[in-house]
């Protein structure tokens, strides 16, 4: 494509030996300036690449005179002739590395102050707060630039794939209705209606279902979602999901569409290997047993193994008291770690304690056949041997056990498993291990609220044969839910929905809502289901996380152009910020006196 | 593409004579049911079309028994065999009109209550409030469905076009910083920072400029924007724009890109004719003179003509007093309306009065050469003739004049011109008349605020030769601004921006801001401009309006899936709504006591 001649005839990323002899016009930033043998060498950079420009005081004194004054990040325009570089001076790391431009004219378009961190040298670690405040400078660096390009390519490929399959992209409102269900809403005060509020959507869940009731058949949206939660872990107040819904489908239809989409995206936008295809489908129960989590990292094995039955033998107090309290004993085999020092084991134990374990029970299988473990004092050799066998322990291995409630055992061993895999170097680079987790329970029991709560969301349908259990044993009802996991991250989840008003009403009732609350909050959904709601289902994929995984980043902030901090601040714009009292007055609001004092 | 066999093997829009003899499975809504000669005819509808299904009590008694119970909007699944229709019974209006499906099995997936308005008969006018409350039913009707499909296609084509030209789609935050500049912000209270607020963006203006400073070169976004304004005319609290910015460009680059994009969109997604290409470029001054507005409808001519100089002659008090008050006299020729009755002229005059005119002065040129006008009493025949000639009046024409301030003359005649064109049938159907308006003034003087205000936005650059006028005569400075107009609607506008910190500071100063205010509100922009900001410019196109024009609709609500009412209410979800006091407490807010009472 051609750029206007006014500022440039080519970008800084496109000149090759084919262009030698041509007169060209470039514009961009001074990436580096070097003086060498009386000449000035400028690396001129734009989004597309870097081109070396040479300023010769003999041939172009005017250009040279300007070049003398140039500093890093000055914006310039160059007119010159493309020349092949001398043999031995080519730069194989640059797409333009075979050529250079001999400057005839240089114009300074805008100077630059010294930047607070270097743009061209990315090996220097820069404090994240500084990078966020000067995000526009950070975006000039190749890492963030490449992430933005990758994100664009992923989203474009998503849209192409879905457009090819008759999906309509439909925008749903950002100014929505607040519902007490789920996470905390961000509220937007209404000026026209005193004391009333809009809420920013946590997801377009209800509206996408209504689009299916509306006959639009296949919907998607790259949708902005909002949750006012404390920003533990790697969360943002606003995030983006690929939101999708289909009519006349069952679980299989949605899963196979998404599996096809993910394979397409990975092949089109990355060089990564997919570990296994089709993606394995694992039941919720099996992944909890084997990995202690519903989002297991399958790039490595290291399964967890329950030994509660074997731990009941002998007289080991730690095991006995955990089992007496309805807990369990679960272990993991650490291959080749039988020779770990006391200090190394203590480090690992400390890590387990930081996750909530009271401690770790270790069993080292020395290569000479000796077993070193506190267990040997309280259990018979046969009893110990049965445990070793259950974990398939080999000479040279280390076995580690947690004895506690099921929740603590799983939480600790899930994270310990990942930590050990990293320590043992078991995680292959450039591999994506994807799997589906299915057969989720529809409900869990919320001990705090003393009621059933939806595992996924209250709109998920249930397996037909389990519907009768709603009346007798709701916790046994399996949802028509599917989560998609990649390298230990949940990158998406969805379900086939309820489309029958009476069944939806029953789910809300089980969640402790009375008829009035149901009508007030979800009356529009129940009413819609009475006007010919088709069977439908869908999914949402977390876009930020998906791009993060594809880009090999550790934080979603690295794949968002203007992220907020962990504490929800925008350091570039300075948001949030106080507003004029006049603005609050128009919204019929005032800051509470106790807050003002604080 | 293939649907899962579970619910359907084909859609309701795809069967043709090629499929005769095949067994198929369909799913959809009962659009209509007719009993005819012992058979039941079902029109089964989905997003893709309508297929006729025949239930024969002899051949498939079970299917027929179910069909007897079916009503409009019931959701069903049909298994049957494709049959060619008898000659003479084909339906040329349906893509599937050559065939029918002989039902073997029917399953009722979900019944429907009687809908509050008919889905299949769209000729019946339905109250808009009812349509909005049951939006999911309105979306089943072909008009809204087609609009949603068109909107999807337009947006997809936009993205394809821009992706082909190296643009990156980049998401900018919705939780932004409030600035008192421009329209009223929607605010979002912060929970973590007491008494502080985010604001929803009126546009991503600042961030897209920072992306250019960040070297990303070519940005776009289909961006949601928010303005808490009183909803006069056809506005929504949230709206969508194609937001775009480019580095190293001048006005010509942006205009030619957008002109290419619009031609591509029109040719790809509509059957409309473009009146003139390349789009005419008109100066702000010329369009104000000739059409009384900066967004003229060029599908017809009917120019306005100023006659202030000629009106100064004679003794016509209406003209004289307008001119004495620094006003003007401006007229329009209404071809072939010389024979309008007194009643017709009175109707037109009443319309002009409703727009703020004190009245209209008429001059009828009868076909017999006679002139009928109040002017003849106060002006000589020559003086009257000069006016007729200025307007190129012909026998049989009617000339109408407004004498008032320039603002009133233009406001009235701009709307009168459109009204007359409609009345005279001068507006060709299926034509899009596009033009650019350029050479806008950078500032206007805001009489209320007693200060200069930016005509477009405070970031617009100015013609180089006018920069010196900033100090002497700011109202004479011409901006590097361009608006794109289609059929009398402004569908977009943009500018080449300021990229020099000192110049940007001067513009803010002229707008009455002191140094402290500038730093507080725009310090991050001025600082960014000091780190090598490239020349850049961009534009925003109003997507809702564009789709509305392409879809031949009169309101943007017809091309938005879930619009709010003119008074910013969501009738489907019931938003805005009161929230729990607990929610407000967490946000450190309370409703003002005086508001509670009201």
Image (cartoon, coloured by chain):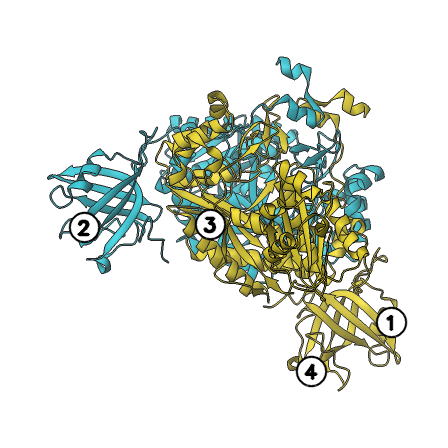
Chain colours: A yellow, B cyan
Task: Tell me if residue B276 comes above or below residue A32 in the rendering.
Answer: above
Residue A65: mark: 1
Which of pointers 3 and 4 indicates the residue nearer the eye? 3
Query: Which residue in the structure is indicated by mark 4?
Result: A21
- Please report the residue visible at 49 percent of the width from the left and 35 percent of the height from the top: A475
Query: Which residue in the structure is indicated by mark 2?
Result: B90
Q: Are marks 1 and 2 on the same chain?
A: no
Task: Tell me if residue A573 comes above or below residue A505 in the rendering.
Answer: below
Pointer 4 with pointer 1, Cβ within 8 A: no
Instruction: State how far apart marks 2 and 3 are (Cα).
Output: 32 Å
State the image coordinates of residue A552 (x, y, percent, origin top left). Answer: 66, 60
Front in this rendered view, residue A543 or A116: A543
Instruction: State how far apart marks 3 and 1 are (Cα).
Output: 54 Å
Chain of the residue under label 2: B
Can the viewer see residue B468? no
Instruction: State how far apart marks 4 and 1 are (Cα).
Output: 24 Å
């Amino acid at each position: 494509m051609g750029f206007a001649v006014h500022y440039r005839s080519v970008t800084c990323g496109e000149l090759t030996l084919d262009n030698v002899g041509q007169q060209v016009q470039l514009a961009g930033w001074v990436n580096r300036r070097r003086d060498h043998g009386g000449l000035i060498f400028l690396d001129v950079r734009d989004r597309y690449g870097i081109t070396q420009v040479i300023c010769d005081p003999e041939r172009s004194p005017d250009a040279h005179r300007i070049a003398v004054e140039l500093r890093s990040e000055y914006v310039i325009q160059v007119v010159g002739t493309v020349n092949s570089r001398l043999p031995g001076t080519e730069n194989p790391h640059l797409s333009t590395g075979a050529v250079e431009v001999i400057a005839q004219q240089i114009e300074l378009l805008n100077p630059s102050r010294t930047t607070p961190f270097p743009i061209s040298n990315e090996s220097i670690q820069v404090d994240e707060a500084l990078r966020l405040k000067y995000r526009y400078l950070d975006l000039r660096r190749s890492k963030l630039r490449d992430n933005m390009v990758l994100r664009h390519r992923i989203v474009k490929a998503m849209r192409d794939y879905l457009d090819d399959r008759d999906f309509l992209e439909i925008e749903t409102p950002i100014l929505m209705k607040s519902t007490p269900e789920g996470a905390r809403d961000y509220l937007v005060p209404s000026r026209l209606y005193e004391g009333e509020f809009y809420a920013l959507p946590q997801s377009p869940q209800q509206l996408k279902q209504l689009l299916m009731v509306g006959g639009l058949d296949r919907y998607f949206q790259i949708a902005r979602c909002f949750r006012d939660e404390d920003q533990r872990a790697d969360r943002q107040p606003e995030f983006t999901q690929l939101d999708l819904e289909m009519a006349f489908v069952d679980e299989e239809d949605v899963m196979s569409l998404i599996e096809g989409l993910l394979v397409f995206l990975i092949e089109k936008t990355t060089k990564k290997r997919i570990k296994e295809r089709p993606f394995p489908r694992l039941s919720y129960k099996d992944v909890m047993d084997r990995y202690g989590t519903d989002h297991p990292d399958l790039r490595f094995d290291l399964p967890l193994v329950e030994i509660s039955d074997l731990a009941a033998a002998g007289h080991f107090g730690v095991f006995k008291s955990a089992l007496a309290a309805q807990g369990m004993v679960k272990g993991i085999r650490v291959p080749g770690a039988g020779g770990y020092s006391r200090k190394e084991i203590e480090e690992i134990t400390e890590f387990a304690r930081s996750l909530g374990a009271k401690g770790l029970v270790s069993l080292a299988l020395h290569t000479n056949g000796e077993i070193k473990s506190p267990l040997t004092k309280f259990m018979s050799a046969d009893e110990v041997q049965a445990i070793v066998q259950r974990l398939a322990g080999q000479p040279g291995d280390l076995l580690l056990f947690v004895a506690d409630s099921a929740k603590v055992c799983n939480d600790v061993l899930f994270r310990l498993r990942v930590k050990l895999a990293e320590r043992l170097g078991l995680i292959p680079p450039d591999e994506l291990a994807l799997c589906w987790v299915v057969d989720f329970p529809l409900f869990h029991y919320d001990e705090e609220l003393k009621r059933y709560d939806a595992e996924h969301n209250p709109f998920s349908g249930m397996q037909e044969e389990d519907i009768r259990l709603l009346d007798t044993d709701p916790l046994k009802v399996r949802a028509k839910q599917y989560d998609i996991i990649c390298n230990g991250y949940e990158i998406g989840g969805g379900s086939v929905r309820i489309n029958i008003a009476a069944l939806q009403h029953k789910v809300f009732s089980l969640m402790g809502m009375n008829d009035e609350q149901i009508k007030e909050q979800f009356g529009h959904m129940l009413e819609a289901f009475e006007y010919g709601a088709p069977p439908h289902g869908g999914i949402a994929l977390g876009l930020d996380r998906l791009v993060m995984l594809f880009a090999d980043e550790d934080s979603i902030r690295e794949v968002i152009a203007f992220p907020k901090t962990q504490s929800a601040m925008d350091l570039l714009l300075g948001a949030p910020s106080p507003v004029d009292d006049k603005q609050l007055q128009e919204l019929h609001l005032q800051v509470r006196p106790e807050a003002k004092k604080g």
